[in-house]
Image (cartoon, rainbow, N blue to C red):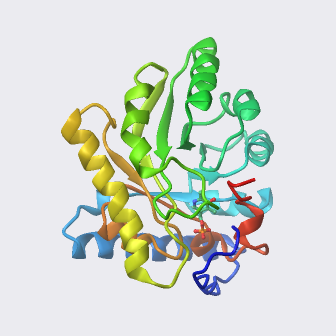
Amino acid sequence: MAETDDAPAPTTAFPQASTVTDFAANLAAVQATIDATALRAGRNPGDIRLLAVSKTVPEERLRLAVQAGCHELGENKVQEAKRKVEAMADLDISWAIIGHLQTNKVKDMVPFAAEFHALDRLKLAETLDRRLQASGRSLDVYVQVNTSGEDSKFGLPPAAALPFLRELRAYPSLTVQGLMTLAMFTTDTERVRGCFRLLRDLRDRARDEDPDLVGPGGLSMGMSGDYPVAIEEGATVVRVGQAIFGARPLPDSYYWPSAAH
Ligand SMILES: *Cc1c(COP(=O)(O)O)cnc(C)c1O
């Protein structure tokens, strides 16, 4: 991510998990936080799904995580995901693509992805729908909204989200599951919360307009640094990487090239 005026959130030291026992402990700790936060917020913990984000984690360590009970993995780059899918075809894993997708990568993603969390433009919807139809399948999708207003982030401007959902009706193989966002990277929890609230408000407005417009109305939001806040604000899927696998060696700007480019 490009530098913003906000101080970046300090990277909490997430220790590397390197044994099945480490992974089991990390998964249990994250799940316990999900459960406790949900209950405190008056929500049912069973309404929140943990998607483990495995980008940059090599196959050997991923196999340990799967042994520890991780069966849904999120990757943000199609090429990396494709390599892992092929290398781990012997395992029972459901794969999600959660990052920005170039139209020319659609053909590589469609054969293996169970869900896609970063739908943000009609051209991509159209290309996906055509390729899915040709493959005789549908795909669960979340529409990505840029709730932080930072131009370094992908996603539709909030005002464009509802019109976009209306247009998606034209693409029958895209099964809308809800909305997705990345909150602002800042230690200011109230600003982070504001991003999540905005996504929830958009979901609620879409439902008010038409109960079917946003599918089941899921909210894919919250990462290692902010998932408890996201749960308080209604997250139904949290995308957690470092708190399960350990800190990544490279800064996030490496994985999220600026949307402005
Ligand atoms: C990497 C990533 C995450 C997870 O971030 P962590 O800090 O590892 O929890 C969530 N969502 C997206 C889109 C990502 O690229």
> Where 101 sits versus 65, above or below?
above
> Where 162 sits versus 190, above or below?
above
* 239, 90: nearer the viewer: 239
Residue 108 position by quadrant? top right
Q: Quadrant of the N terminus?
A: bottom right
Q: Quadrant of ligand 1?
A: bottom right
Task: Provide residue 96's location: percent of width, then percent of height.
Answer: 59, 45
> Where 116 sits versus 166, above or below?
below
Residue at the spot x=38%, y=52% of the render? 219
How many numbered discs? 0
* 121, 249: nearer the viewer: 121
Would residue 221 appear left or right of 261 to someone viewing this image? left
* 203, 91: nearer the viewer: 203
Task: Provide residue 127's location: percent of width, then percent of height.
Answer: 64, 23
Residue at the spot x=27%, y=31% of the render? 212
Task: Provide residue 81's location: percent of width, then percent of height.
Answer: 73, 46
Would residue 84 appear left or right of 128 to someone viewing this image? right
